[in-house]
Image (cartoon, rainbow, N blue to C red):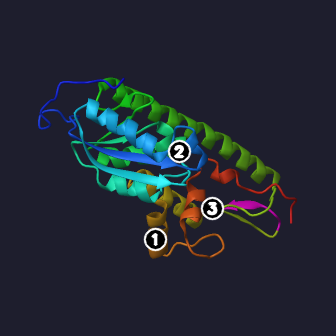
Amino acid sequence: MPRTRTRTNPSSDPHAVTEAVIYTRVSTSEQVDSGLGLEAQESRCRAYAEANGWTVAGVFSDAGVSASGIDRPALNAALQTLTRGRILVGLKLDRLTRNVSDLTPLVQRIEDAGAEWATVAEKFDTTFATGRLMLRLMLEISQWEREVIGERTSAALQEKKRRGERRGTLPLGFDVDEHGQIHDNREEQATVARARELREKEGLTLRQIAEVLTREGRQTKRGGKWGPETVNLLLKPRYLETIAESPNR
């Protein structure tokens, strides 16, 4: 049952909300029969907004779209409407994202807009102190996971470099010489760092990052065009572990 509250003056409470922006998503048609269809999600989100005295300012739906990455048409549109006094409402956290690595840029965009965030099923709501605490814990866990993966990735790569192994195509940021030894490519590593900066600090979409990298004259590993999928590879925590498992060539 949604929690009710006493309405407060938005000018005196930075977390006060008057309008809700609803976001719904389904990845497959089967979810319509599982109670997670777009209409069912919207209905429950509307009930949550009504119980809290919020006017629904808009409903945005991504149909047939997975939760991999946050570069989704309707989600981007919903995020662009957020301002102070508005809250993004989804039925469940996995409607917004399933990837821990996407949590930080998603939260950054919501906070930069001065807005709040709630999911109905988990009773997660940043207009409450408890919800904000939960969010901080989620972000800390996200950061911890990235650091642990980074340490494992670095150790694995250094071992490959120590043994002079080259397996398949090297990721952006590394080159191999005529003796099969792996070496850092500082220019390419700067491109990886730039992509992550655009995502984590500026909250750009994958497509927007691709446009920036192209505009700045940065090259892909094969000299091709930057696109959302290419950029997404750079943002994966396990990116440096993408060296293929094929024999040396």
For the residue marked with disc 2, what is the amino acid?
A: Ser
State the residue at coordinates (60%, 58%).
233
For the residue marked with disc 1, what is the amino acid?
A: Glu
Q: Secondary structure at mark 3?
A: loop
Determine which residue is flagged by label 1. 211
> Residue 60 versus residue 112: which sits nearer the camera?
60
Q: Position of residue 74 (x, y in %)?
A: 41, 56
> Residue 244 versus residue 193: which sits nearer the camera?
244
For the residue marked with disc 3, what is the amino acid?
A: Gly
The answer for how far apart the CA atoms under marks 2 and 1 are is 21 Å
Left or right of 22 on screen, residue 206: right
The answer for how far apart the CA atoms under marks 1 and 3 are is 20 Å
Sequence-wise, which precedes: disc 1 or disc 3? 3
Quarter of the figure that contains the C terminus: bottom right
Is residue 100 shown above or below 195? above
Q: Secondary structure at mark 1?
A: helix
Q: Position of residue 227 (x, y in %)?
A: 55, 68
Determine which residue is flagged by label 3. 173
The span shown in magenta is: 179-184
Determine which residue is flagged by label 2. 101
